[in-house]
Image (cartoon, helix red, strand yellow):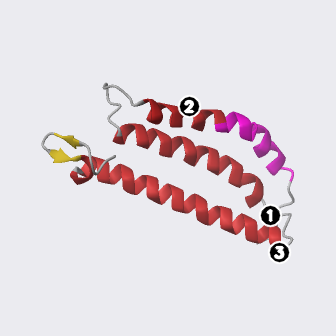
Amino acid sequence: YARTTVRHGRALVEQQNVQLAINRMHMETEALRTYCLRAAWEMDNLLHESPNIILLMNYSSDVIQRVTNLNLDVHGAHGGAVPAYADKLVRDGIIWTHLAGDNTQRLKVMKRFPQKAA
């Protein structure tokens, strides 16, 4: 989308604010992917007492919402018409939080984990 859409005489991908938003989306997505791989490794190696497994759901909900909001910025939602597919992503990101479970309850469960001595 950013490569083909032209605003103010330049492609969106050439504008610095769009580049920053795309880079931030990439950074957030890669951080989430790495965290997922770490949590999967911990489960495979029977480290069930690790808090990362519970925290992953909270972090993924936050990342999904941040990335979809940045996507709206790239699509020009600053007072303009929002494409239906971009708006649907934001809606799905908000619904994901509710489908994934109540994050507050998950954090309460986290507090019950025994803390390891450093």
Q: Residue 96 location, x and y as percent?
A: 66, 38
Choose top left, top right, bottom left or bottom right for residue 77: top left
* Residue under the image location 16 percent in, 47 percent down: 10
User: Within 10 angstroms of label 2, few (less than 14), some, or many (20 or more) residues?
Assistant: few
Say which element carries label 1. Answer: loop
Disc 3 is placed on an element classified as loop
Judge depth for marks 1 and 2 and give the one in front.
2
Q: Which residue, given by chain and number where applicable, does mark 3 sit on?
A: 45
Residue 68 at x, y = what percent? 49, 41
Q: Earlier in the sequence, mark 1 or mark 3?
A: 3
Mark 2: secondary structure: helix
Task: Name the amino acid, label 1.
Answer: Ser
Which callout, 2 or 3, points to the residue nearer the camera?
2
Q: Nearer the viewer, residue 50 or 57?
A: 57
- Label 3 sits on what residue type? Asn
Residue 91's label in the rendered image is 2
Instruction: Tell me which segment is drawn in magenta.
Output: 96-112
At x 59%, y 35%, the residue is 92
Circle 1 residues within 10 Å: few <14, some 14–19, many ≥20 = some
Quadrant placement of the C terminus? bottom right
Q: Earlier in the sequence, mark 2 or mark 3?
A: 3
Q: Quadrant of residue 48?
A: bottom right
For marks 1 and 3, give the CA distance: 11 Å
The chief SS type of the magenta part is helix
Mark 3, Cα crowd under 10 Å, few <14 / some 14-19 / many 20+, is: few
Q: Is 54 left, or right, of 81 in this rendering?
A: right
Q: What whole-number distance in Å separates the C-alpha atoms at marks 2 and 3?
A: 36 Å
The residue furthest front is: 4
Identify the residue at image location x=42%, y=43%.
70
Is 70 or 116 nearer to us in this picture?
70
Residue at label 1?
Answer: 50
Please name the amino acid that badge 2 sits on: Arg
